[in-house]
Every structure is written in structure tokens, then in C-alpha cells.
Amino acid sequence: MSFLSVRDVVTAYGKIEALKGVSLEVAEGAITCLLGPNGAGKTTLMMTIAGILKPRRGSIRFAGGEIAGRAPHAIVARGVALVPENRLVFAAMSVLENLQAGAYQRRDRNAVGGDIERMFARFPRLKERAAQQAGTLSGGEQQMLAVARALMSRPQLLLMDEPSLGLAPLVVEEIFRIVAELHRDGATIFLVEQNAHMALKVAQHFYLMEQGKVTFSGDPGSLAEDEVIQRAYLGSAKS
Amino acid sequence: MLVDFIQNTLDGLSAGAAYALLALGFTLIFGVLRRANLSFGPAIMFGCYAATWTHVNFGAGLLLLALITVGGAVLAGAYVERLCFAPHRGGSAIAAMVASFALWMQFEELATLVMPRHLYAFPLLVEGDPLALGPFTLRVDALVTLAVALIACMLLAWTLYRTRFGLAVRALIEQPSAAALAGINVPWVFVRVFALASAIGGVAGYLVVATHGQITPMLGMWATLKGLLAMMLGGLGSLPGAVIGGLALGLLEAHSQWYLGPQMRDLIAYLLLFVLLAARVPWMTTRSAS
């Protein structure tokens, strides 16, 4: 049984359908990647799964329960956390407060302190800047903070929307190293990426999305990389 | 000359303290819900009228009247929140604002229906003569207003920076989407912010009415205008700005009245607002999320 199951989800902005019936599955313990050109609807899908957007039709099942259309905080309570596109850190709050915000729903306050220490161990640069305002961090550090903030809710499914966006190549490598590390430690990750090359290196399964629909599903070896990259950036010729 | 200036500054500060509280309440709602609540003043008026009604029919002490004012404002604020803001949460900001305008009318009508006289006496905060300190006159109720406003600001700061609720409020002001994604129960925070803002407004309303010793149905509009004006002078959506705007407004009014006459007092504030808006001064625009 798959961990996250999206079936025929339609999400629209007014009259414009951004998702025209999307179906995909995310397996437990794996890294699943969603590729596709700009405007394909990848972020809309992530926001729909996380509850920020409500689908018009379709079903989203996670760990046996229906989460489509539920409030975002209820979905976090079910164990799904999204690292949003553009990180959206709380710039005026300190790094530590950002992490505390991520743990907002946790009732076990003592364990939260331990988790913060673990985040600092995993992301040493965040520890150095613990009292600093998040807005003063570099792009790569803000990305790490956004990931750490999402991890603070101890999610069973981590959604990541374009973690490499706007970052220098060396920093991108570091981010993907962290993604691989999280996977090794047992996390289930559903990752949206424009950087197809890096994404295919870590993913066990990937989907291609174009113009609001899933157009390809397979493992990283099943399609020639240059065709994947072409369709990820430009879309396929026939669409 | 200097004595007058300092005297006016003192008077202006105490009026400004009440304005600062009004602006804080307005800003909390505007910063968190990103909506202007035109029933903010009227809800305060409801609380003050509830206290007046109690006093007229039963007689009551100052503390009880203060509690009724604040409680009434919170109750009225909850009514406004449920009717005007909750239904339009994901939708039109204009619809919410127009609905709050309609409730403003409702509150005014209710006040004149239940308490038909244009003016009612309200028990004074402090009886007796003002204090004389050298060449200066210090009204005791002005000092009380300043002290209460200061305590209210400190309590608000403590709430915002030392409690879990405050963390949620600050997160929502900055990044509403990310706050929801962090697991914050946004609708529930909205309800509590409304209650907090209404309570702060209720305190301001009580201080003003108890200082002047009277209440009229114009209180609703008066409080809304002062609160809006002070909020805009200090920078939309900024809490420290609300305090600065409120104090600045009080000082501006006190000095304008002295040097230019009472007619200019209100005009100057609106003139300044117009100039600042027309010149598109940066701090006047909304602190928007990136």
C-alpha cells in the first residue's frame, strides 16, 4: 500500500484549472521526485497536498486517511510537512524561533529541545547563527533552516518544493547531500525539482508533469537523461 | 514659551497614549488578518455603552465599569469576527471590510435605541484638582492613562515575545502560508487576536470616556478615525509603529491646537496623512510578505 496516494486531483484558480486530474503515488521510505517545466502545476500540487489550496475534485490519501481539502494544520498533525518554494522563513524571527515555530503543534515540549539540538548537529551553520534573524542568512542557510523547520514537526512524509531554487551549485550539492542523508535515516521524501540532473541522482522514482497532468512515471534509468531534462525544462514536443 | 511647549507635550502624550492603544488594536487585526476592521471603534463603543447602561440603571464602581467595558468590547469584537471576517477568510477583503462597516451602523443604531439621549455622563476616573508641579499642570487621569497604556504595551510585548500564541501571531504577520504549513491553527489564532485587539481597544475606550466624563454615540467613529490615523502615521502593520503613530498624533494635535487654534487641530492630522500618502513615504506602505 502506498504511503501517499493522489487520485485525479483537480485544483483550479477561478476558471483556470492548474491541475487537470493528477494521479501519483509516493512509496514509504523512498525519495520520489516530480519534474516538469515552469507552470506545469508542481507547486500547485504541493500546496494542494499540504492543504493551502483546496482541490475541486479528487482524493489525496495519506497513511490510510483522506486529507484532501483539510486545513493545513490538520495535515501537519497527520504527519505531512512541506518545505515551501522560496523557503518562506520567518525573516524577523531568530533561527531558534523559526525552529520553535516548526514544532508549534508538538505537545512533548521536552523532546522539542532535544530535536533542536539534533537539528543543530545536522546543520552546524544554523547552530552558529541560532540567535540571528533568519532574514540575514544566506540563501543556502535559509534553505537549510526551512528544511529543519519542517523536520521539527517530526513528519512521516516530507514534501520539498524546489529546494535548489536560486542557490549556487556548491550549495545545491550540499542540499542534495542532506536530502540523501535524510533518506538514509528513514525519511520518505516527495521532492519537486527543476534541477533534473541532481534530482535523478537521489530519487528512486520520478514523475514528469506537464500542463497540469502527469505525463511520465518511472525510475531514473527508464528514460534517457537528456530526454528527461528536455521535457523537464521545455515540455515534450507533442504537448 | 518653553513652559507652554512642555505643557502641551505632556497633554499630547497622554492623549497619544490612548491613541496608541487604539492603533495597536487596529494594527493587530490589520497585520494578522490583513483586513481593516471598520467596526473596531464601534465594538469599543458597545463596551462603553454597556458600562454606561449598567451605571445608569444600577450604579457601579470604577473597576466594575472597566471590566464591563473591556468585556463588552471583546464580546462585540467576537460578533464582528464571526459575522464579517470568518466567512470571508479565503475570499474578498473588500467584502469583509464592507460587512464590518455594516456592523458599525448596527452598533450605532443599537446604542441610540437602548440609550436614546445624545450624551450621558460617565463616572470620572479621578475626582478633584489636577496636580501642580512647578509651572506645569498634571491631570491625574492623564497620568493614569499613560501608566495604564504603558502596562498594556508591556503585557502585549510579553505576550508576543514570550508565549506560544505570540510566536504564532508574529509568524502569521510575516508569512501567512509558512505559518499555516508549520502547523499553526490559523482560524483559532484569528479569533484570539480579535479578542486581544478588542480588549486593548476596550481599555483605551474606558480611559478616554472616564477622562472626559461623558459618552456619545460618536465614540465609535471617533475611535475608528483616531486608530486608523495613528496606525497609518506610524506605518501600516507595524506594532511599534502603532505606538509611535499614536503618540505622534497626540503631540501633533496638542501643539496644533495651541499654536493654530482648535479648528486646525483635526485638520493638521488629516493634512499630514494626505501629504505622507501623496509623497508615498516608504513606511506607509504595507509590510507585505515576500
Image (tube, coloured by chain):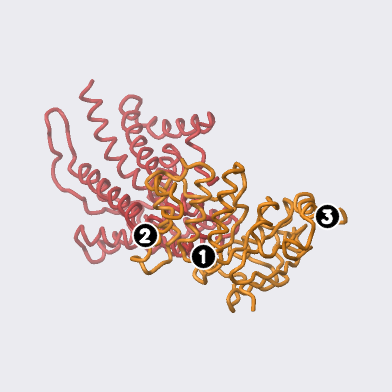
Chain colours: A orange, B red
Residue occupied by mark 3: A236
Q: Nearer the viewer, mark 2 or mark 1?
A: 1
State the image coordinates of residue B113 (x, y, percent, origin top left). Answer: 41, 62
| Disc 3 with disc 2 on a shared chain | no
Residue A135 is tagged as: none
Q: How far apart are the two marked residues, 3 and 2, measured between alpha carbons?
A: 49 Å
Task: Left or right? Give the position of B89 relative to B155.
Answer: right
Residue occupying the point 40% across, 61% down = A115
Task: Name the one closer to the observer, B231 or B217.
Answer: B231
Residue occupied by mark 2: B164
Q: Nearer the viewer, mark 3 or mark 1?
A: 1
Q: Amino acid at mark 2?
A: Arg
Q: How far apart are the two marked residues, 3 and 1, measured between alpha carbons?
A: 36 Å
Task: Left or right? Give the position of B91 relative to B239.
Answer: right
Residue occupying the point 30% across, 27% down = B258
| Disc 3 with disc 1 on a shared chain | yes
Residue A185 is tagged as: 1
Q: Is residue B66 above or below residue A65?
A: above
How many numbered marks does the figure carry? 3
Q: How far apart are the two marked residues, 2 and 1, measured between alpha carbons?
A: 30 Å
